[in-house]
Amino acid sequence: MPPAEKSSHTVGIGLGCAIMMNMSDASHKREPESKLLPLKEAVRRHLKPGMKLHLAGGIGGPSAAICEIIRQYHGTTPNFTLIQSTLSGHALNLLHGNLVSKLIFSAGADISTSGRPSKIMQKVWAEKSLELENWSLCSLQQGLMAGALGVSFMPTRSIARSSMAQDNKDSFKEIDDPFGGGAKTGVVKAINPDISIVHGCVADEQGNTILPAPYGDDLWGPLASINGVLVTVEKIVPADSIKKYAALVKIPNHIVKAVSVAPLGLHPFSMADPGISGFNAYETDTEFLEDLHQASADSRKLDAWIKEWVIDCATPKDYLNKLGSQRVKALKQITTRGAEPPDFSVKPAPEPGAEYSPEEMMLMVAAREIARSVLKAKHRTILMGAGSRAVAVLLAYYQLRAEGYELELITGNGQIGYEPQPAELAIPSVAGVYSSKMLTDTINTQGVFVGGRNNKCLSVLGAGQIDRNGNLNSTTTAEGQFLVGSGGANDAANAREVLVILNQSKDRFPETLPYTTCPGDRVTTVVSTMGVFTKPIGKTELRLAACLPDPKLPGLEDRIKRVQDNCGWLLKLSDKVEEVAKPTPDELKLLRWLVPLPS
């Protein structure tokens, strides 16, 4: 062997032996650094005024951490830029406390048994007391994805042809497709928070974190954060447990600055078990959220509420003690009402002439139209919007399944193949999460399964307003009052077909929208409390196709006139305007099983 080659080989063997000796020598072993800190200390060390702060952790965000931020910065003006998809619950109090100077968001609403406009959001919107950037759920996540990947922008199918495109012109552009074809491509600017806070199920002391599923809007913000992630969790587990569930770890320890224990850290919102042995899930505390909603109507009442529930609860443990063991225990009692409707044939049917409300009639007609659309276009998925109108999707789902049609329901937070839970109309329950066949995130749901090239999806949406071309507004009224923002509505408008449900009035059907949240190109059907409107795909005009029954107006011409009187433009009629059939006993029974009448 040549001398040089022999020398190199000898050195390699010697180095390898030295490494092996060091690895086997107990004196050279070191325990991994623990990042475990009390929440108060973690926030004190790593949050600084002026930071771009991203909040993840489901609807409403990491509540325990939000409360700690409010405690530490109460009465000051830290001028945070807040990046959060959906502001609800405790997160809205960051705005009320003047802790935020800029907000980058998708939706802001009071959520409990239903979703309602937030008085806090309406106040800051009207007063322009902080800078606001409203995005769709998917486009906001695509901006964070670009930040995580280290690229300056990310293509998107959302935002284009909406008022958001103009509002966000410094961060959204339409460019020529660089690969030809003549099409325009929307791009969103990368977003990089200074720090991200996320609430997980469990973590080890080094910060390897398992998040609750579905992942919704929780994945890309932490990965895009310049200065890392603050993690709160329900409990700390040994490193061996993390290795056992490595496929569920979404936040690796090397990007984590600190990890803090905060049981019920998403309260008052729910947390599902992603499949960890011995983990306790919990449901949404709707009573708590309703109390907060009531307090939010008056600034002084809200100040008192925040003092009681946030300022005076110095630690997460104090907060739990105030909730009380019985309330906590009740939230952890996960109950599921079977997705199969009861066998109504063994019960007496209501008389065909049983009374029904205009709202009930609208929901039953919408269910018929959903079923018709699914069978005609062979849709395989339906995106359910949040709110009371979602019951129309549930009605259609059960009816189609009874006929043997295979159909999957999708929710915007990442549930695929979801089995509906009756009366679950505002936000998904833990029981509903457990019924799903796939749990994923917003980009997969809204970007691929709803709006992707191969989607076979019907989106069913509510709206604040609609114009003659099916364009939708869920952002602001003509008087400048904030509604709820885009949320996932703009993304849902990319589905193969869109059906809209809303009450009929001149205010809801204006000639010109004050704000276009979603373009109406894919809208084909609109169901109101008075009529059914249809149009083909594209920039075409809605026509009245059918009138709903009205015992006060038995004549079809009178009902057509009523619809026209409650429409802001000169309405076009289909060649033949139909008369919608009254509800059948089975439709009424199923509807009232899903949404029982008040006792």
Image (spheres, helix red, strand yellow):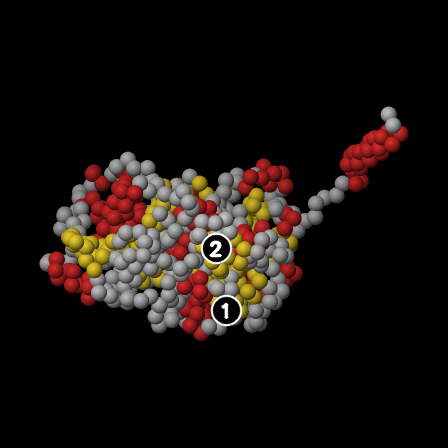
Q: Position of residue 166 (x, y in %)?
A: 44, 65
| Residue for badge 2 | 176
Q: Position of residue 320 (x, y in %)?
A: 51, 56
Q: Is residue 91 above or below residue 241?
A: below
Q: Is residue 208 visible?
A: yes
Q: Position of residue 58 (x, y in %)?
A: 48, 53
Q: Position of residue 551 (x, y in %)?
A: 13, 58
Residue at the image position 52 percent from the left and 39 percent from the top: 277
Which residue in the rendered view is the most extreme toward the top? 1
Residue at the image position 16 percent from the left and 60 percent from the top: 560
Identify the mark nearer the N-term, 2 or 1.
1
| Residue for badge 1 | 131
Name the quarter where the C terminus is drawn: bottom left
Q: What is the CA distance from the residue labelled 2 to the residue labelled 1?
A: 30 Å
Name the quarter where the N terminus is drawn: top right
Q: Secondary structure at mark 1?
A: strand
Q: Is residue 36 visible?
A: no
Is 19 on the left or on the right of 386, as rendered? right
Which residue in the rendered view is the most extreme toward the right? 3
| Mark 1 burial class by Cα count in 10 Å: few <14, some 14-19, many 20+ | few
| Mark 2 burial class by Cα count in 10 Å: few <14, some 14-19, many 20+ | few
* Amino acid at pointer 2: Asp
Is 417 on the left or on the right of 564, as rendered? right
Q: Secondary structure at mark 2?
A: strand
* Amino acid at pointer 1: Glu
Contact flag, marks 2 and 1 (Cβ < 8 Å): no
Question: Of 44 and 150, which appears nearest the observer?
Answer: 150
Residue at the image position 65 percent from the left and 61 percent from the top: 45
Is 589 on the left or on the right of 422, as rendered? left
Residue at the image position 23 percent from the left and 51 percent from the top: 365
Q: How many discs appear?
A: 2
